[in-house]
Image (tube, helix red, strand yellow):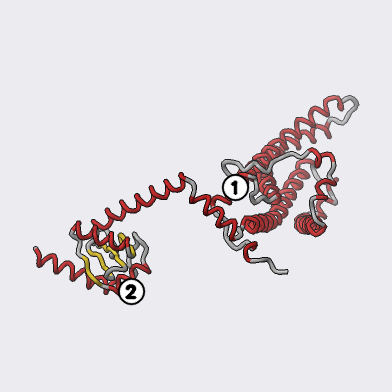
Amino acid sequence: MSVPDRDRRIFKPTPKRIDDFRKEGQIAISKDLTTVCTLAGGSVALIASASWSMESLADFLGEVISNLRPGYHEGLMLGAVRALATAWVPTIVGCGLGYALAAALQLGYPPATGKIKIDPSRLVSPQALLTTLSPKEAFGRALKAVAKVAFVGLMGFWALEADLDVFSSTAMLEPKTLLERAISTSTRLLLQAGGALVVLAAIDYGYSRRTLMAKMMMTPEEYKREAREQEGDPAIRRRRRQRMRELARRRVSAVKTADVVLVNPTEFAVALRYRPDKDRAPCVVAKGRRLQAERIREIARKAGVPIVPRPPLARLLYKLVPEGREIPANLYRAVAEVLAYVYRIRRGAA
């Protein structure tokens, strides 16, 4: 059965609606993006600290192997903890910084924390989460999880495949050489799996953002109601009036600097300025239609700016050239003729 037009979400979300969703914590969130940033932070830290981490572990293993005798095990645990901490603390810190970066990127500023709530019932019973999902959603999530694991696992297998023969003969390697091989393989594995996760994160974030935008779309009734609320807001009206006054002041100042005002004769008015030492081409400093056009003509008369009737050219400039922009090259000749006419009048008057 078709959805009635009044219930269809056909209007793009307004800034207010986007802000309301954000305050409620409804923002585009990607767990895969968080995973990528965390992995990237840990990988950078691992690579940066690889040399002295490897030396620390190699020294520890060398000491263990060279001191295999009764009674040595008493200090073994403390040495192992010290060596592992030296090797892995930078990586753990890097992962934490990557996670914080992902949170900052997605939550924004100020953070949209409305969604961050702890539900004790879900902590006690994981089945409570499943009851909130339809069978279709649950199947889709499960299928997506399997696909992710398979994709990342395949990338990881390709990274490890080249070193399978090397690790089959680990007993023949020196401890330092073994660690070098392990770190080299781990780095390649991280890069390969990281590339796969970047692709997944981009897809996941894009899907999350698209889903959120579809949810924020507005029905005609919602759009009208919000427009009425905005119109009734005194602060909105004050800002609108202030903006109109600022535009009017800028238009008055701009028209006074113009060389000529082209009119059509009551519908359009376009003020042109050309300063060879400043402008590469004639520039539209102000334009208006109907009441605004009348206001531009009035300012031009008071400022002594020539008003020249050129209906086709005035209409074309009004439609094609925004205020503050230069005219297009195909109108140079027509505008140059008008400016030459104005300069002749000024020389004759002088």
Q: For the point 49% across and 46% down, which residue is it?
A: 233
Q: Which mark is residue 20?
A: 1
Question: What whole-number distance in Å separates the C-alpha atoms at marks 1 and 2?
Answer: 47 Å
Rendered-image quadrant of the C terminus:
bottom left
Whole-percent x, y for residue 50 in the image? 69, 41
Q: For the point 73% across and 69% down, which residue is it?
A: 1
Q: For the point 23% across and 56% down, which residue is it?
A: 256
Quadrant assignment, res 8: bottom right
Q: Answer whether residue 50 is visible to the viewer in this image.
A: no
Q: Nearer the viewer, residue 78 or 8?
A: 8
Relative to 258, 344 lies left or right? left
Whole-percent x, y for residue 203 in the image? 68, 58
Q: Answer whether residue 213 is visible to the viewer in this image.
A: yes
Q: Nearer the viewer, residue 150 or 164?
A: 150
Quadrant assignment, res 220: bottom right
Q: Amino acid at mark 1?
A: Asp
Q: Secondary structure at mark 2?
A: helix
Reading the image, the residue beneath label 2 is 330
Q: Earlier in the sequence, mark 1 or mark 2?
A: 1
Q: Is residue 230 above or below residue 79?
A: below
Q: For the point 30% across and 75% down, which residue is it?
A: 312
Whole-percent x, y for residue 286 in the image? 31, 60
Q: Nearer the viewer, residue 8 or 47?
A: 8
